[in-house]
Image (cartoon, rainbow, N blue to C red):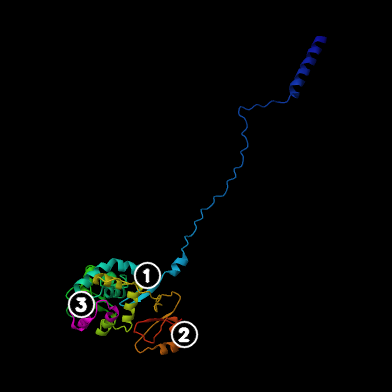
């Protein structure tokens, strides 16, 4: 009996021990490590610095608007390149036809806008020569003294230079020019205007200005075999210097400087100063700064 009681007691004790032991939980995988937060630096945008122009250099570069058969904006570099391109042609024509190379180049610069004018680009016409009754070649229409006038068209600029020489040598009204000295460009410039080549009263002044500013008479001296001495002249104040912020008025038939000054409530002296004018002469189609 005692043995049975002891056996029951031992069994009870063993059962109590098993219940009081805490359960051991095992896992086949190690718990994942906490991920560190990745802080990404914000992408820096590539800053493109604007290309800055040397405004000092550009401001010093002379620019102007050439007005003949069209209104053309040019710089002295454009004119210099034009001279370099056609000086040999001009000297060749001087030798063959007796027209001063300086006059040929100055007319080419003025009439063609140094090769950038409408007629030069569309018709290779560098001298503003109109069709006239004897022209049998191609032509283009262009507004000049009247609307849609007929102008000669050439296959390439060299033809225009040759036709210019033939035009002057083949017409009696220009015959008096060939009595002038070949190195007297001023007399040739005035003679062209007098013979009716252009209606602009300032035509001789413009030709002479280009010849003196760019020393075009050096090519006359070269053809004539004379020693050339450059004449130093003061930079010309160009009446038609381009001002993008200005207001322009186009001179009409019957206009005078006085009437234009009154129209825009300006003093006559103020109008002349704005346009760098030393004389009161105007030409139809001339552009004047009025504001």
Q: Mark 2 points at which residue?
A: 270
**Residue 24 percent coordinates (x, y):** 69, 25
Whole-percent x and y of residue 97?
Answer: 19, 74
Tag 1's secondary structure?
Answer: helix
Q: Distance between the residues labelled 3 and 2?
A: 42 Å
Residue at (76% x, 24% y) in the render: 20
Distance from disc 1 to disc 2, alpha carbons, whole Å, reads 28 Å
- Quadrant assignment for the N terminus: top right
Residue 135: percent from left, percent from top: 18, 77
Between residues 287 and 233, which one lies in front from this camera angle?
Answer: 233
* Mark nearer the viewer, 1 or 2: 1
Sort mark 2 into few (<14), some (14-19) or many (20+) by Cα contacts within 10 Å.
Answer: few
**Numbered range of the magenta stretch:** 165-188
Determine crowd level at label 3: few under 14, some 14-19, many 20+ residues with C-alpha closer than 10 A. Answer: few
Q: Left of 264 or right of it: where is 96? A: left
The residue indicated by pointer 1 is 76
């Amino acid at each position: 009996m005692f043995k049975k009681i002891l056996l029951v007691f031992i069994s009870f004790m063993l059962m109590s021990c098993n219940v009081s032991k805490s359960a051991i939980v095992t896992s086949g995988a190690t718990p994942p490590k906490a991920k560190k937060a990745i802080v990404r630096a914000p992408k820096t945008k590539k800053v493109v610095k604007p290309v800055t122009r040397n405004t000092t250099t550009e401001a010093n570069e002379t620019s102007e608007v050439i007005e003949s058969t069209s209104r053309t904006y040019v710089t002295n570099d454009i004119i210099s390149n034009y001279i370099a391109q056609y000086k040999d042609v001009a000297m060749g024509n001087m030798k063959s036809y007796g027209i001063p190379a300086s006059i040929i180049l100055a007319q080419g610069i003025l009439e063609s806008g140094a090769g950038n004018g409408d007629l030069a680009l569309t018709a290779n016409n560098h001298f503003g020569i109109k069709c006239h009754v004897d022209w049998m070649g191609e032509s283009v229409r262009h507004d000049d003294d009247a609307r849609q006038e007929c102008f000669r068209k050439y296959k390439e600029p060299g033809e225009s230079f040759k036709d210019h020489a033939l035009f002057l040598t083949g017409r009696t009204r220009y015959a008096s020019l060939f009595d002038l000295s070949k190195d007297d460009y001023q007399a040739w410039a005035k003679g062209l205007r007098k013979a009716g080549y252009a209606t602009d009263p300032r035509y001789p002044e413009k030709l002479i200005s280009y010849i003196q500013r760019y020393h075009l008479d050096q090519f006359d001296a070269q053809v004539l075999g004379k020693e050339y001495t450059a004449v130093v002249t003061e930079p010309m104040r160009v009446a038609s210097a381009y001002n993008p912020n200005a207001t322009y008025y186009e001179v009409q038939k019957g206009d005078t400087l006085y009437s234009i000054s009154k129209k825009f409530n300006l003093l006559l002296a103020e109008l002349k100063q704005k346009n760098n004018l030393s004389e009161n002469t105007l030409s139809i189609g001339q552009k004047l700064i009025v504001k």
